[in-house]
Image (cartoon, coloured by chain):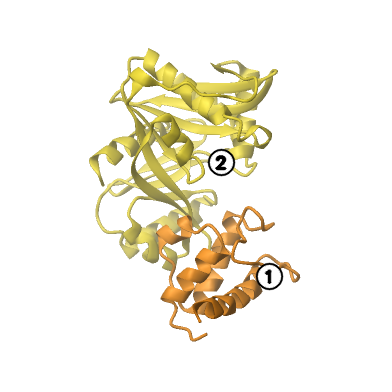
Chain colours: A yellow, B orange
Amino acid sequence: MEKIYEVNINNLYSLLDSFYGNKHGVSVIKTQNYTVVASETSVWPNIIYRTDEGIFTDNLIEEFIYIIKKNNFSDLILLENSTQSYLKLKDKGFFPIEKWIGMTYNNFANIPNVVCETNVDIFVTIIDSDLEKWAEVVSVTLFNKKIFDTQIVKYLISKGAQIVIAKSFNVVIGTALIWIDENNIAGIYMVSVIEKYRGMGVGRKITRHCLKIILERNINLCILQATKLGVYMYENIGFERTGSCFLYKKIK
Amino acid sequence: MKMEKKEKILKVLNEIFRKELNNDSLIIDFLSSPKNIEGWDSVTNLLLISSIEEKFNIQFSIDFIFEAENVGDFCGYILTNSTVEF
């Protein structure tokens, strides 16, 4: 794994690690080769990621399948950065459902202005009603309407996450989450905009606002994982690509 | 000649799309994509890919799966990589 991408993905692992100790129905299983983070009540977090750098062996894949079946982890996603694992995983019924492009930003002296075609207020919130709406929007925009448990959001806030919300005339239209890890690197997650407001610059404005918040914390490196649709928007703001990984789901 | 082969591939793909998207009257062309074909989402995409691979005896690369934008891209990949005669 490229060093800079390792820094990028480690921020995500740090966010997931915050659930260690079975917090709010989230089980964290750590082995020598991989970590499983799975929620009983929420579509997120539900992920397996390898913590070794070796070859993806058949035994390891069989172990994943056993864990998924035994615990009924139907939403569990496997994160894998090597393209070489693809055929082996596919043979075992894991199909790639998403490609994440790791991106970094460090040009905090020149955070660009962005044009937004709609009236929007963006701020960090801890208010219950906002958090419920935030989870609802994330569920619809990013997780195919599956339940995103508000308790998970509140737990993350207690661990230091910042929940960013975008409102237009008091209606929640966009979301983001900021996580600062142990190495003082900031990660931006769950940037989303409801369908009606897409293409108006709301996503860019949310991201810019997140960068401003991160700047205020005196942090000089920000990372995120972009999907194919989002990558150009982030490049437009000044993010640079650092690597990629794939998300797999057990389909067969 | 190349175009003729692509047209033949398109016809086979059309049948696969009809079956996987459960739409007997669906007509696809080279520019058909998830943006303009109802029901072509990330889940049905996996089913489509599986069926296409089986039919044409090919394996799409993981990068292609995420880079392909429309049916024309699939036709081009099949034309270059499939050993099936058209």
State left or right for residue A221 relative to residue B61. left
Give me the residue at 41% from left, 47% from top: A48
Query: Furthest-bottom residue in view?
Result: B85
A115 or A60, which lies in front? A115
Q: Amino acid at mark 2?
A: Val
Image quadrant where residue A239 sits: top left
- Residue A205 shows in the view: yes
Q: Classify A226 as above or below B14.
A: above
**Residue at numbered disc 1:** B18
Residue B48 marker: none
Chain for numbered disc 1: B
Give x and y (percent) for residue A166: 59, 22
Q: Amino acid at mark 1?
A: Arg
Image quadrant where residue A28 sits: top left
Number of marks drawn: 2
Give me the residue at 48% from left, 20% from top: A209
Label 1: state its secondary structure. helix
Mark 1 or 2: the one toward you? 1
* Label 2 packing within 10 angstroms: few (<14), some (14-19), many (20+): some
Label 2: state its secondary structure. loop
Q: Classify A30 as above or below A87.
A: above
Query: Furthest-top residue in view?
Result: A216
Q: CA distance from mark 1 to mark 2?
A: 31 Å
A45 or B17, which lies in front? B17
**Residue at numbered disc 2:** A43
- Residue A96 shows in the view: no
Give x and y (percent) for residue A41: 58, 38
Chain for numbered disc 2: A
Give x and y (percent) for residue A204: 51, 29
Q: Classify A246 as above or below A45.
A: below
Give me the residue at 56% from left, 18% from top: A122
Give x and y (percent) for residue B30: 59, 66
